[in-house]
Image: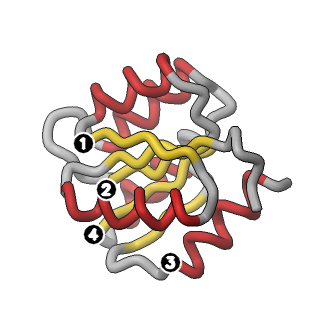
């Protein structure tokens, strides 16, 4: 079980994805914050002690790459897992270069997601 203070930010423009991931993570014992746009994600990271972000790669307006860059400027030690429905190798590689440590494809394998989160937060 993670420490109760472990907080995860879920950022996706699809409300159903945010809802499913939020409920799953809350049941796993995390404090969950949500955002539907990159700008909202930046506000949440400034306002709350977020340890990890699940960040959609393709969002309208500020996309996941730009959001990742700005999140890392605000909080360089934040852990980020990219989430995407598209197998865009160039964007995934770019996300890793910018500091993301994993990428999970939709539809989600929640067991893998759980392992990826716990591995990072407990290392």
What is the spatial separation of the Cα atoms under label 2 and label 4, in whole angstroms? 17 Å
Q: Is residue 58 left or right of residue 83?
A: left
Work out which quarter of the rendered image holds the N terminus and state it: bottom right
Residue at image coords 48%, 18%: 47
Q: Which mark is residue 36?
A: 1
What's the coloring here? secondary structure
Q: Earlier in the sequence, mark 2 or mark 3?
A: 2
Residue identified by numbered label 3: 110
Q: Earlier in the sequence, mark 2 or mark 4?
A: 2
Q: Nearer the viewer, mark 2 or mark 4?
A: 2
Position of 49 relative to 54 (above/below): above
Label 2 crowd bin: few (<14), some (14–19), many (20+), radius 10 Å: many
Residue 114's image quarter?
bottom right
Circle 2/circle 4 CB separation < 8 Å: no
**Residue 119, percent from left and from top:** 76, 63
What is the spatial separation of the Cα atoms under label 3 and label 4, in whole angstroms? 18 Å
Position of 88 relative to 31 (above/below): below
Q: Earlier in the sequence, mark 2 or mark 1?
A: 2
Residue identified by numbered label 2: 18
Residue in front for this viewpoint, 86 or 123: 123
Element assignment for label 1: loop
Circle 2/circle 1 CB separation < 8 Å: yes
Element assignment for label 3: helix
């Amino acid at each position: 079980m993670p420490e109760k203070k472990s907080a995860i930010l879920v950022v996706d423009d699809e409300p159903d994805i945010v809802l499913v991931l939020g409920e799953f993570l809350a049941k796993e014992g995390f404090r969950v914050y949500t955002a539907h746009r990159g700008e909202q994600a930046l506000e949440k990271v400034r306002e709350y002690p977020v340890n990890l972000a699940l960040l959609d790669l393709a969002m309208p307006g500020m996309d996941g790459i730009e959001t990742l860059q700005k999140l890392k400027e605000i909080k360089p030690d934040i852990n980020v897992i990219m989430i995407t429905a598209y197998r865009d190798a160039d964007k995934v590689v770019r996300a890793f270069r910018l500091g993301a440590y994993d990428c999970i494809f939709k539809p989600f394998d929640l067991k893998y997601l759980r392992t990826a989160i716990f591995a990072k937060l407990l290392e």
